[in-house]
């Protein structure tokens, strides 16, 4: 029988939807694929979370205390869904579910050119953003761009479809007396932390890794995306439109 998240302790060799949920929630702590199989990658995620957030000697076992700490982590770092919504004025904030399986004409049929307006923002991405907020408390991040549907792209003459639910842009407002160069250095430093802590990549070479736009494309902001994930990790059910759906809070009952 399949366990729901919160119904059992999770450790090596556990399998099931509750493992996938754990992998999603810890997406910004090292990070692995949400494949529902608790292997060495998931163990590393749990250990990073225990060491960095809980500040305990890591065991790699997601016991009761660890699941409680994950709840506390979520509560302490809410995501502003108003800031995530599309600003086209036509959709309700997260596109209209159009263009599934359609690609930019003349381009390869790969995710980077997929025109689908995903039904929300990917949960793993938002949990990873949460971890970024945790690791970089010195910055007052602002979500400068979340969902941008096809209509919004048309209004702004853009062609990239990454922001159809798979990407988010973070901005750090300049402090007093700071220059654009300071801003660029700051964004580079943030990317460095995300590579180290969340196992993100700069660029899109590797499959199934969170990606950051390189600094020549995003000099003064941080673009974070999940477009390198295989389709099985980009299923509709993995996208959310509200904080409640993102958190999907479940009682811990073991
Ligand atoms: Zn829109
Ligand atoms: Zn972006």
Image: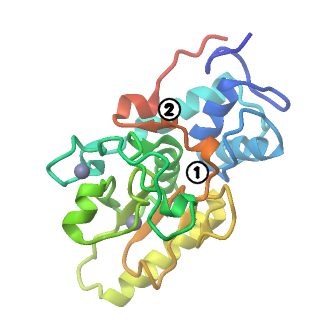
Q: Are marks 2 and 1 in contact (CB under 8 Å)?
A: no
Q: Badge 2: how crowded within 10 Å, few (<14), some, or many (20+)?
A: few
Helix, strand or loop at mark 2: helix
Label number found at residue 237: 2
- Left or right of residue 19, residue 69 in this image: left
Image point (42%, 49%), residue name: 116
Tell me: residue 212, above or below residue 20.
below
Image quarter of the C terminus? top right
Image point (42%, 39%), residue name: 76
Report the mark closest to the observer, 2 or 1. Answer: 2
Helix, strand or loop at mark 1: loop
* x, y percent for residue 72: 49, 33
Q: Badge 1: how crowded within 10 Å, few (<14), some, or many (20+)?
A: many
Label number found at residue 214: none
Tell me: residue 149, above or below residue 159.
above
Label number found at residue 28: 1
**Residue 240 or 117: which is nearer the viewer?**
117
Image point (36%, 69%), residue name: 159
* x, y percent for residue 154: 24, 64
The residue carrying mark 2 has its beta carbon less than 8 Å from ligand 1:
no
* x, y percent for residue 242: 34, 34
**Residue 104 or 209: which is nearer the viewer?**
104
- Left or right of residue 85, residue 47 in this image: right
- Left or right of residue 190, residue 84 in this image: left
Q: Dividing the image into four quarters, tell me where ligand 2 lies.
A: bottom left
- How far is mark 2 from mark 1, CA to CA? 20 Å
Residue lying farthest front? 106
């Amino acid at each position: 029988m399949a366990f729901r998240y919160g119904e059992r302790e999770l450790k090596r060799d556990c399998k099931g939807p509750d493992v996938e949920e754990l992998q999603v929630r810890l997406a910004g702590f090292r990070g692995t694929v949400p494949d529902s199989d608790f292997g060495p990658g998931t163990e590393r995620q749990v250990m990073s979370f225990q060491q960095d957030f809980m500040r305990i000697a890591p065991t790699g076992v997601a016991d009761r205390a660890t699941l409680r700490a994950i709840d506390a982590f979520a509560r302490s770092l809410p995501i502003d869904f108003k800031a995530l919504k599309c600003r086209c004025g036509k959709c309700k904030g997260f596109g209209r579910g159009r263009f599934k399986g359609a690609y930019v004409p003349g381009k390869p049929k790969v995710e980077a050119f997929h025109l689908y307006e995903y039904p929300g923002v990917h949960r793993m991405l938002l949990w990873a953003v949460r971890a970024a907020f945790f690791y970089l408390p010195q910055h007052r991040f602002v979500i400068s761009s979340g969902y941008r549907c096809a209509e919004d792209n048309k209004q702004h003459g853009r062609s990239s479809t990454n922001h159809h639910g798979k990407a988010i842009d973070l901005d750090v407002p300049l402090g007093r007396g700071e220059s654009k160069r300071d801003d660029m250095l700051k964004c580079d430093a943030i990317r460095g932390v995300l590579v180290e802590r969340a196992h993100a990549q700069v660029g899109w070479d590797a499959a199934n890794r969170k990606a950051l736009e390189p600094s020549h494309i995003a000099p003064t902001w941080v673009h974070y995306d999940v477009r390198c994930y295989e389709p099985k990790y980009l299923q509709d059910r993995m996208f959310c439109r509200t904080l409640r759906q993102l958190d999907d809070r479940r009682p811990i009952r073991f």
